[in-house]
Image (tube, helix red, strand yellow):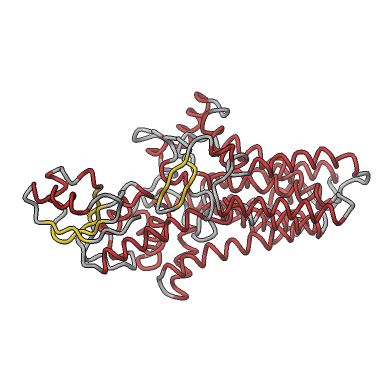
Amino acid sequence: MDPLLFYREATIVATEGLPALYRLTHTAHPPLLQGLVALAFGLVGRSPAAYTAVGVACFAVGALMVNAVVSRCYSSRAAFAATLLLYSCPLVLVNAFYPTHETVLLAVVASALYFFAADRFVPFRWSLIPLVFLKQTALVALASFFAARLLDRLRRGAGRRRLADDVADFLPAVAAGLAWAVFLRALGGSEWRGDLLGQAAGGSTYAYLGERLLHLGVFNAFLRRNLENALIYNWQWSITLSALALTLGTAARRREPPSPGAFRCATFLAIFSPSYALLVLSIPTWTIPRYGIPLLLGPYVALGVAAARIGNRGRFAALVTVLWAVSWVANLSSLDPVTARHGALEIYGQRLYDVPEENAGADRLTYNLQFLDAVASQNALVAAALRSGADGLVTDCAALKLDEKLAAIALHPEYYPYPAARPLFCAGPEGLGDPGVAQRLTGRVLYVGRDDRSRLQALVDGLGASISIVGDSPS
């Protein structure tokens, strides 16, 4: 559902300007993500392909910068292992096919970390600015860089740079953030969607969020579920345990002190990873798998660095190959016994883990490439309904929020590249006995499912509804 909303928001920015985004939608996130997509729309035209290209570009930039920073700070072998495994991770890979805040944040953090580790002050200053225009939670990364800069100063001493110079590295980002806050307030916008957090109207969302975290504690059920999504579910436990075991097992082998770049990299990750987990993943809102993507940078860099300390090339290659193979098993199937204990759900021919969580919704299924196959099947179903001239669709409307997607397109057809002049109404087979539902399903209705079409036709005929049910291919 989120990609559909992001598509509309980017279209508004591209066609009506930035102020219209906050006037016509409920978004409260800063506009960097929508702006990137709007830029792509301006360059190559509005299309799903241009939208997907932004996600793929962020994926590529992130991979290049992770490889660059680990190679500079540690070794090319460590960089190869960390980059290959991180960007084969199902959570990262499935979210590369449409732009999300978390994949962009991963790329921005990796870029800023490269300049920070290399002590390239000027590009480092400017690389921090995207953090304030991406998402409110990205400010954790900005604060982590500041803390890491101060610790690095303690390590190296004052040297030629004054404390004021170190602080000045962060002034452009702070100034940009203040300017954004003033601009948003002038538009009458909110700094966050407080209603999603359970906040009543009025007051500061940041203050309300702080109160909720103090009441619930950061070690709450939201943190637990988000950590499970990022570090345990769908074979991620194999990566987490490997990183931990290798780091502990090879720690004694390192004799020489770390290089300045390695110290900066390790210091930032040691601050950012727990800070992001405790301050972001504990927020009492949705628990969606992609929220943990930025957290993955630390474990995968640690895994790559520890694996590179294995002196035997054959053992190193064998380890990376096995972990890479496990990643692709996780990408293409849902066979992890640790996750499967929660049950399974079949959607459009794909058997997916069904983790019961009221705060996740259908987005809990976006954890591997099977989700993309399910989405493709759903898109084909809607396309078939439109081609058939149907006015309605009888299927599992709750699957991947199909009913919500159709309603969103019907409400704002001008923002989507679909023939939505004739909106589709969706109903489940069990709803055909409801006169209210049957009244909305007029004309030709495409049915896709396992039930007997003739029985459904008799059901609506008994209500006196003017409905002709066509199509009976199994889903």
**Which of the two residues, 320 or 405, is positioned nearer the viewer here?**
320
21 lies left or right of 299: left
Count of numbered tags:
0
Question: x, y percentage for residue 267?
Answer: 75, 43
Is 411 left or right of 225, judged from the image as shown? left
- Residue 327 at x, y percent in the picture: 64, 52
**Residue drawn at x 40%, y 67% as measured from the top left:** 14
Q: Residue furthest left?
A: 464
Q: Is residue 99 left or right of residue 304?
A: left
The residue lying furthest to the right in this view is 255
Tell me the quarter of the picture where residue 390 sits. bottom left
Q: Give whichever of 442, 404 is nearer the camera.
A: 442
**Residue lying farthest bottom?**
44
- Is the residue 71 above or below the residue 247 in the image? below
Q: Is residue 333 shown above or below 231?
A: below
- Identify the residue at image location x=31%, y=67%: 418
- In the rendering, at what x and y percent does residue 449 appear? 30, 53
Viewer-closest of 213 and 349: 349
Quadrant containing the C terminus in the rendered view: bottom left
Residue sitting nearer the eye, 447 or 52: 447
Q: Looking at the image, which residue is at 32% across and 64% down?
A: 415
Examine the rendered structure and indicate whether residue 54 appears above or below residue 259: below
Q: Position of residue 87 (x, y in %)?
A: 64, 56
Identity of the residue drawn at 69% across and 54% down? 324
Residue 205, picture quadrant: top left
